[in-house]
Image (cartoon, rainbow, N blue to C red):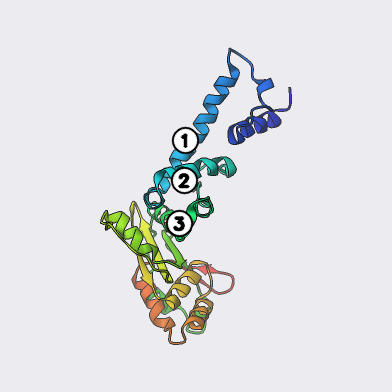
Amino acid sequence: MPPLAETQSRFRDALVTGDAAGITPLLTGGRYAEKRLAIHQRHYETSLVKALLGKFPATAWLAGTPFVSEAAKRFVHEHPPQAPCIAEYGENFPRFVSECPGAGRVPYLSEFATLEWHIGHVAIAVDRPAVAIEEFSTIDGGALPDTRLSLQTGLRYLHASWPIDELMKLYLTETAPERFELSPGDVWIEVRGARGEFHFSRLDAAEFVFRKSILERRSIGDAAERALDVNAAFDPGQALGALIAAGLVHAISRGVEGEHS
């Protein structure tokens, strides 16, 4: 009998890859051990495929349920969960499904599925108390550029090369016309949500870069410089004020060492 860790590894391989050769000799007790194993194999595939389809219903609407279901079956065997939390499973599915044979007919499939993934995650976030604009008055003007902000957890930013937000609105409102033409064009999307609700909106490129940089924990000064590289007319003060007014800031970190408030 091999060590427990090796036995567990063989059983995992049998579930994920479908190859039971390594575990079959170790199956004991009762009759038809291979059939019992097959039940576990089917359960593994069925449960994860169901979970993926539950996360990407809009993607199935766009590309077709049979196509997405088949992609999901391949995905669960080629990319098994790496953590016990199924809520985190599927982050790489948008790219995977877009690389499957036949996906070329929907060139914006990966970006659309990524938007759906973001929506699913922000909708389960919980907002923290927002920082009031008065708290910024206590920050010395010279220290403001080095200040870092913590934004609400239910925020995502997506730069897409197609207006996928228009497609998502059609899906959500169930107002898809008989014919709809989508032309390529850059869009910068902010996705926000909490406690089962969400919404998304477009930003201009500079504000998108500013907010995304802040979310990535870059300093206010660094974020402003990056936005100014995109648009020299960008107003950092106005952008910061809008971020605060929207209730998106929940903590302030002052200085290099990150003194929180």
Question: Which residue is tagged 2?
Answer: 87
- Residue 116, given in percent of the width and then of the height, sits at 41, 55
Q: Residue at x 44, y 55 (%)?
A: 113
- Tag in front: 2 or 3: 3
**Left or right, residue 15 beside residue 186:** right
Q: What is the three-letter code of the residue carrying label 2?
A: Ala
Would you say the residues marked 2 and 1 are in contact, meaning their CB atoms lie under 8 Å apart? no
Front position in the image: 226 or 188: 188
Q: Quadrant of residue 192?
A: bottom left
Front position in the image: 260 or 234: 234
Examine the rendering and report whether any part of residue 72 can be seen: yes
- Residue 91, given in percent of the width and then of the height, sits at 51, 52
Residue count near mark 3 (Cα–Cα under 10 Å), binned few <14, some 14–19, many ≥20: few
Which residue, as the protein is rendered here, is positioned at the far bottom?
233
Marks 3 and 1 sit apart, C-alpha to C-alpha, by: 28 Å
Q: What is the three-letter code of the residue carrying label 3?
A: Arg
- Helix, strand or loop status at disc 2: helix
Q: Residue at x 45, y 42 (%)?
A: 69
* Mark 2 / mark 3, whichever is N-terminal: 2
Marks 2 and 1 sit apart, C-alpha to C-alpha, by: 13 Å
